[in-house]
Image (cartoon, rainbow, N blue to C red):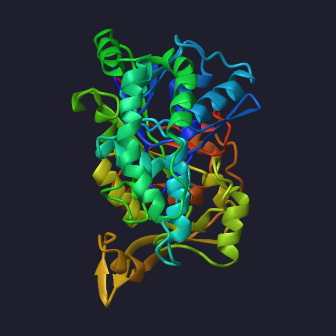
Amino acid sequence: MANVVVVGAQWGDEGKGKIVDWLSERADVIARFQGGHNAGHTLVIDGAVYKLHALPSGVVRGGKLSVIGNGVVLDPWSLLKEIETITGQGVDISPETLMIAENAPLILPFHGELDRAREEASSKGTKIGTTGRGIGPCYEDKVGRRAIRVADLADPATLEARVDRALQHHDPLRKGLGIEPIDRDALVELLLDVAPKILRFAAPVWKVMSEKRKAGKRILFEGAQGALLDIDFGTYPFVTSSNVIAGQAATGVGVGPGAIDYVLGIVKAYTTRVGEGPFPTELDDADGQRLGERGHEFGTTTGRKRRCGWFDAALVRQTCATSGVTGISLTKLDVLDGFETLKICVGYELDGKTLDYLPTAADQQARCKPIYEEMPGWSETTEGARSWNDLPANAIKYVKRVEELIDCPVALLSTSPEREDTILVTDPFAD
């Protein structure tokens, strides 16, 4: 059976939630492999709206196993609140439908405090644009071998030792930032209280995934954010704190690279970004305003307004390469309805030279000027289209040109938030 990885191929917010939900109907297991609750997916199913942050998008589908892998950093209190909200909408969430990796690191209250204090202390131009939810500091603790993991909640003595080790690092940091020391006993009590509520979902995910593969089950690996926020291949330092590209799917749940059969890159028909950092095709004009309004470009998790710009084929060609994308799902095509002229970035001008990729150095990224190719728009509507025959000729030309410029075929085309409004070109789950 084919196993599929879904990754965002821009700066996130590409519409992964709908596509994962669309694909999850045919999957047996849906696994989140990186990120935290700083990312959000909005699903619209039969008119009902579900806003997910840490839970895998497949959790709203009955008869599926949803997995939060070891590559995810987990805020236990936020997760429990999210579970309460989603179950209140009639979704069954139990240890039979949701599994959390025992080796997943926990985001603790002091992680968020440190995250926000650092951002507030940063001068203009050095702010990362973090959501302040503690994602970065938690990943730092994981790499620094001082993280508290899900399995540590099972033994009070181990838990206390882990807390003491973490505080040896964090209290001096807090002092330097003018933050009060952590109340050690209160933190231990807080963790002991939440322990049984989280441990009921805990499991050796790597083992379960191996068993599911041997049983021929279809696995859908779900990423958060987008490849341009990858800690190694994104627009550093304005990135997230984890690897977002498709290769992380294997290490983020504990399977080998041979478990990945197809990589689906989710790509918006234009470009958006939240937070700070370079954005070569950003539009600070009426067209940018129009894209934002038509696309309802506000973050699911933060509510922050997204920056909008024309489609950047050079960047998507780059992310398709670093993630080994097999095919893309082009979303929000309907947002482009009514534009008389559309522009696509095909490369950059940097200090008198032409580049077909975004350079690594931050100062060079900031100086890159987009090189545009113009295409005629269309006045007809594409919203709700479910076949190629429903699309205007110029919309089809736009899609075909995108394929050519990014050197990757379109597998799916999304024309509204409704899951049924999807044109299937190639089935990612085809054996």
In-image side of 403 versus 186 (left or right):
left
The extreme bottom residue here reads: 352
Q: Residue at x 38, y 66 (%)?
A: 237
In-image side of 278 versus 22 (left or right):
left
In-image side of 308 versus 114 (left or right):
right
Q: Residue at x 75, y 23 (%)?
A: 88
Q: Position of residue 200 (x, y in %)?
A: 51, 14
In the image, is residue 32 above or below residue 339?
Answer: above
In the image, is residue 207 above or below residue 176?
Answer: above
In-image side of 379 versus 247 (left or right):
right
Instruction: Say which of 136 and 246 sits in front.
Output: 136
Q: Position of residue 190 (x, y in %)?
A: 57, 30
Instruction: Say which of 131 and 109 sits in front.
Output: 109
Q: Position of residue 69 (x, y in %)?
A: 40, 29
Which of the image's four quarters has the C terminus? top left
Residue 139 appearing in the image? yes
Q: Residue at x 30, y 72 (%)?
A: 359
Q: Residue at x 52, y 68 (%)?
A: 276
Task: Indicate the quadrant where residue 232 lies.
Answer: bottom left
Instruction: Say which of 170 and 275 sits in front.
Output: 170
Which of the image's four quarters has the N terminus? top left
Instruction: Say which of 421 and 377 sits in front.
Output: 421
Residue 102 appearing in the image? no
Q: Position of residue 328 (x, y in %)?
A: 43, 46
In the image, is residue 229 above or below residue 374?
Answer: above
In the image, is residue 174 above or below residue 244?
Answer: below
